Image (cartoon, rainbow, N blue to C red):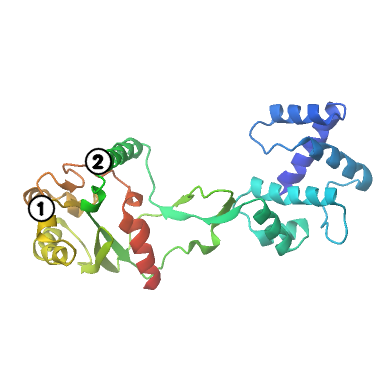
Amino acid sequence: MQVIRTEYAEIHLVYGACNEVGHAAAAEYRQRYPNRRHPDVQTFTLLHQRLVETVSFEVRNPDGGRQRGARDEFDEAILDCFAEDPTTSLRRTARFLETSYSMCQRVMKEDGQHPHKSRCIYEIMECDRENRMIFSHLIVEEHERDPNFLDQILWTDESTHVRTGMVNPHNEHHWAHQNSFLAREDRFQHKFSINMWAELFGNRVVGPWELPDRLDGHNYLRFLREDLPMLLDEVVTPEQQQHIILMHDGAPAHFAIDVSNHLDNLFPGRWIGRGGPTPWPARSADLNPLDYFYWGNSKESV
């Protein structure tokens, strides 16, 4: 938060360099610091006035009869704290500015800002971005051609429920006027406890279904042959199965040659996955609704 005091000092220096002309100082400040929050003309004059009267940049709580100009200045200081660090909290800001939690909450609410939670995603390599764009464009184009296209996809996914728990993003948030869907890269899955599988077709979820602890091509193929037909019957009619598009990601077990051959016979030209008719982009779990919707809720329940 020391950065805010430094910016106040720089604002005042610019104001003096421009012979205490507010409009000139505001223009000069924007030119010198194009990537910062730009104060308005009144901020320059009020900051100078406060320094002359109090010999301090420190902003005090304006409650208790202070005039409106000082209150506006104090509100600006609260907004500056969140502009400098959008992940800070109301309580931390209140302690720093020696004011109340409710004061900070009021200012942020009146400014139209809200706390938005972040979510964990897989690490994305630079080489993944092009494949993700290609896949996303393909999905959009098919959906524009056929509005029912997404309803034909059978989304599948595996998830490992471990005893080490999961990240609770309740206290991890950032303040902004609009939700930018901030994502935080997290670790890959290394430890195993219970390996579960689920499918999503339309708005219907089937599962979770327990898989072997160590999934390989052999036991995954056995699952596709023996268990998947039964699970499909729960959500897909025989007529729908003629048009269904199965999706699975690029896990090693999915890439086995026998698995690919089986899917080619069962869903000819109609499956999404590593090495399939429609390639699935690597490290793109965030494109699978089961990953960003279903597993998070089910793990919280567990």
Q: Vertical placement of 7 versus 117: above or below?
A: above
Q: Vertical placement of 174 versus 294: above or below?
A: above
- The image quarter in which residue 138 lies: top left
Please name the residue shown 29% across and 36% down the image: 134
Q: Position of residue 240 (x, y in %)?
A: 14, 56
Please name the residue shown 70% across and 26% down the image: 31
Q: Name the residue beneath numbered marker 2.
A: 142
Q: Position of residue 228 (x, y in %)?
A: 14, 63
Please name the residue shown 29% across and 62% down the image: 159
Residue that extends furthest to the left in the rendered view of this protein = 265
The crowd level at tag 2 (other Cα within 10 Å; few <14, some 14-19, many 20+) is few
Give the number of marks.
2
Q: Is residue 298 visible?
A: yes
- Report whether 68 appears left or right of 249: right
Q: Name the residue beneath numbered marker 1.
A: 242
Please name the residue shown 68% across and 39% down the image: 37
